[in-house]
Image: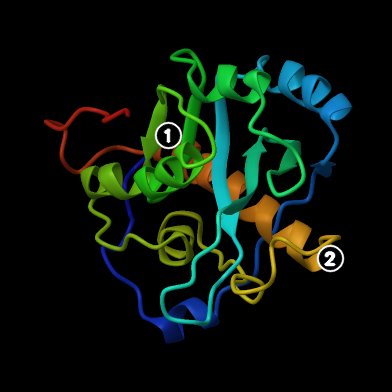
Amino acid sequence: MQNKFKNKISNEEVAELPTIHFAGEIVVVDTLESIDDACNDLLKYSVIGFDTETRPSFKAGVSHKVALLQLSTPTKCYLFRLCSIRLDKAIIKIIESKSILKIGADVKGDIKALQELRHFKPNGFVDLQTIVSDWGVDEKSVKKMTALILGYKVSKAQRLSNWAAVCLTPQQQSYAATDAWVCAFIYERLQQTEKKNNNITLEKI
């Protein structure tokens, strides 16, 4: 596919775009019994979307541990509630797998937050922020990468909501699923499009 991506986009231009959201099944994983089923399904895929969410802190010096891990296939997104369940060995198997690409943005920050819960050796992670420049895209936020590469906008209304709440609202679930899924969607579109810089190879963590 010919590369027609612009390198930058304004907030005003983004606001005019149609909204995109994950339209597949969202599965909240908040019991130990449901972890294995989720992970067994994810192991079938070679590329999945990846993201985390942490309860925001509005006080200086106060921080919270990561509350949610999102892993998404094209049709199903699993929301692992790490505020309710442990970072289980079945989940570790996926995030240590070299054969499953986990596509995200600011991946190192997400990995660091997860490693505060349990030690693991990350493998197979691809950070969109480190590769989009190969296609001539200068923007690094998921919001603007989605706009430039897919031609849609994603809602960020739930970003600062309480991710450690007893129950996640439908709006939170949709936001969290979309953020993970759209990263894999962006990666797929990039793979179908000519690079503007053919000398740089894919960087994996």
Q: Vertically, is 34 above or below 66?
A: above
Spot the residue most to the front.
Answer: 61
Q: Which residue is mark 2?
A: 169
- Note whether 150 is above or below 197 in the view shown: below
The kind of residue on which mark 2 rests is Thr
Identify the residue at horizontal 78%, vertical 64% (top origin): 165
- Dot label at residue 26: none
Q: Position of residue 108 (x, y in %)?
A: 35, 43
Q: Nearer the viewer, residue 202 or 165?
A: 165
Q: Which residue is identified by label 1? A: 192
Q: Residues within 10 Å of mark 2 (few under 14, many from 20)?
A: some
Q: Is residue 148 above or below residue 190?
A: below
Q: Between disc 2 and disc 1, whose residue precedes?
A: 2
Specify whether 139 is left or right of 123: left
Front-lying residue, 134 or 49 = 49
Residue at x 63% of width, y 25% of height: 91
Q: Give the class, few, some or many, for how many residues have Cα within 10 Å of label 1's Cα (few <14, many ≥20).
A: few
Residue 11: image location, x then y, percent: 42, 82
- Residue at point 68%, 23% (across, down): 42
From the viewer's perspective, is the residue at label 2 or at label 1 nearer?
Answer: 2
The front one of 64 and 1 is 64
In the picture, which quadrant includes the C terminus? top left
